[in-house]
């Protein structure tokens, strides 16, 4: 599966951005589609993910500010980011992975930079 992201950029604190990711093939309900982020020198961390049935989970620091949306027919997962903070600055990666198998299929996009200025 190839994942192509778009929508990163530079925004002032308090602003909004939308990240989009499209998969090269349809993603089944047995897979999460989600977003991770990574700051140089740190581990990649989960931001938000959603099951094929629409159940979403969020990292604590983004709850109430970010919304993840998945469209199975369009093969897309979007991340709507509001009230952005400088600490949200990172490279954001789209991810698809099997839900039931920890060592199962796991795909990554190329990453898109989000920079929030204070």
Image (cartoon, rainbow, N blue to C red):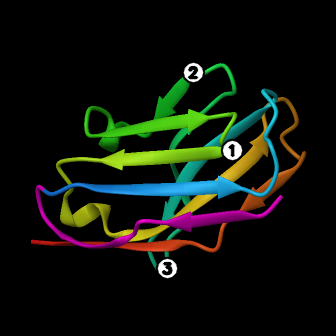
Whether 34 is drawn above or below 111: the answer is above
Q: Is residue 92 left or right of residue 84?
A: right
Earlier residue among tags 2 and 1: 2
Q: Secondary structure at mark 2?
A: loop
Range of magenta residues: 1-14
Residue 3 is covered by the magenta coloring = yes
Whether 115 is drawn above or below 98: the answer is below
- Tell me the residue at 12%/63% (across/down): 13
Picture disc at residue 41: 3
- Tell me the residue at 15%/57% (across/down): 15
Whether 91 is drawn above or below 108: the answer is below
Q: How many other residues sit within 10 Å of disc 2, few (<14), some (14-19) or many (≥20)?
A: few
**C-alpha span from label 3 to label 2:** 31 Å
Residue that numbered label 2 is attached to:
55
Q: Are marks 3 and 1 in contact (CB under 8 Å)?
A: no
Residue that numbered label 1 is attached to:
75
Q: Are marks 2 and 1 in contact (CB under 8 Å)?
A: no
Image coordinates for residue 83, horizontal then vertical, percent: 17, 49
Q: Quadrant of the N terminus?
A: bottom right
Q: Residue 97's image quarter? A: top right
Image coordinates for residue 102, horizontal then vertical, percent: 83, 41
Q: 16 or 61, which is in the foreground?
A: 16
Q: Is residue 46 left or right of residue 74?
A: left
Furthest residue toward front: 74
Q: How many other residues sit within 10 Å of disc 3, few (<14), some (14-19) or many (≥20)?
A: few
Q: 32 or 24, which is in the foreground?
A: 24
Q: Secondary structure at mark 3?
A: loop
**C-alpha span from label 3 to label 1:** 31 Å
């Amino acid at each position: 599966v190839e994942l192509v992201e778009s929508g990163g950029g530079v925004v002032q604190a308090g602003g909004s951005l939308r990240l989009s990711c499209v998969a090269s093939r349809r993603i089944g309900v047995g897979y999460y589609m989600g977003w991770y982020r990574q700051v140089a020198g740190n581990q990649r961390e989960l931001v938000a993910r959603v099951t094929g049935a629409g159940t979403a989970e969020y990292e604590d620091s983004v709850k109430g500010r970010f919304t993840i949306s998945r469209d199975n027919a369009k093969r897309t997962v979007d991340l709507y980011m509001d009230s952005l903070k400088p600490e949200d600055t990172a490279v954001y990666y789209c991810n698809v992975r099997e839900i039931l198998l920890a060592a199962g299929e796991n795909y990554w996009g190329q990453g898109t930079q989000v920079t929030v200025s204070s």
